[in-house]
Image: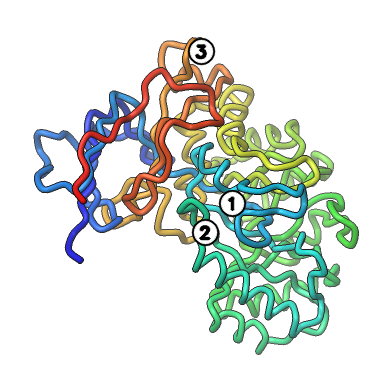
Amino acid sequence: MGESKLVIRNIGLILSGRIEDPVLDGDCLIAIDGRIAAWGREKDLDTEGAATVIDAKGVALSPGLIDSHVHPVVGDYTPRQQQLHWIDSTLHGGVTTMISAGEVHMPGRPKDIIGLKAMAIAAQRWYENFRPSGVKVLAGAPVIEHGMEENDFKELAAAGVGYLGEVGLGSVKDGKTARQMVDWARKYGIQSTIHTGGPSIPGSGLIDADMVLETGTDVVGHINGGHTALPDDQIICLCEKCHAALEIVHNGNERAALLTLNTARELKKLDQVILGTDGPAGSGVQPLGILRMVAMLSSLGNIPAEIAFCLATGNTARRRNLDCGLIEVGRAADFVLLDQAQHAPGKTMLDSIQLGNLPGVGMTVIDGVVRSERSRNTPPAMRAPEIIGRRA
């Protein structure tokens, strides 16, 4: 098929996704065959022979945002809120990758071992085969149930399942059993998340800090509650003792989110903080949920907006072993181009975000292909990128 070359020029600001170096020097980025090939100053780069050229018009470029915690079901539909096209709407909020924490809202979700494995494998397949509006939905996350054995996890991994649904949403409620299953999953390369806090749906229950620590999952799911948070001392304990990802979600307790952020910062553990929405849920679907988290944590948590973007991109990519989320050669060419919202206060986009305002999304790119232009959901950006050349 040959090389498919994308050139994005006139970039005003490149956000790297790397918390240790969040802003890069450059005004141009090149992707070839859906992978980042080079970035820097346009005068120093080979921009010839591009299949697509985007004039960024001076706006910011960030790695595509990652939602670390969603509950998809099938296609671009959720029965949780009887809503169509929620994934496409979320793309318009700058999210290019979503990670399932379990397809728990599937009507009649099977809880027998054969059935839950079948559904997990099917869910992994249908989102691999059908990417709504190009969004990468990493799904097929089985909820563990009593009776599962090591071979079940081996079989799931061999079939392509890479994640467990939230531990605690099924019949396994004790730390010892959960730890055994999490260890089996990890042995075969399956990553795990645990429900944290009070129950969210009938059948789930309280998961306290002791069980989280005993279970030892890779991600402390919605550490700020989904919806009900643990007491402050337990959240602080988890931040102190966990080496796992500390996941803050939109559909949780905002005060507990800020407590987590502040505690992680004091402990020099900001690199462990990742973001999700935990939607669709009882509070609905949040197309702008990740952007809202970035603005909320930056403004009320008093961290620079460029650092807040890392929590939604590179931190998650590193913790989740993804090939996107960072501006690095060889990574997937998944981007969101943003600018300060029209008439929003602040001298720059980053300044405006740290004042609590949402930016405007002007374009998304996934695997080097433009997937959406000016967002229908964010406030309108001051400037919007433009495709100025495209070769058939």
Q: Residue at x 69, y 75 (%)?
A: 119
Q: Amino acid at mark 3?
A: Ala
User: Cα distance, mark 2 to mark 1?
Assistant: 8 Å
Q: Amino acid at mark 2?
A: Arg
User: Cα distance, mark 2 to mark 3?
Assistant: 34 Å
Element type where label 2 sits in the image: helix
Name the residue nearer the viewer: 129 or 69.
129
253 sits left or right of 1 in the view:
right
Residue placed under numbered mark 3 in the picture: 344
Q: Residue at x 72, y 60 (%)?
A: 194
- Check the picture and name the quadrant holding the N terminus: bottom left
Residue placed under numbered mark 1 in the picture: 68
Residue 30 visible at all: no
Element type where label 1 sits in the image: strand
User: Cα distance, mark 3 to mark 1?
Assistant: 28 Å
Determine whether label 2 and label 1 are within 8 Å by CB. Answer: yes
Between discs 2 and 3, the one toward the N terminus? 2
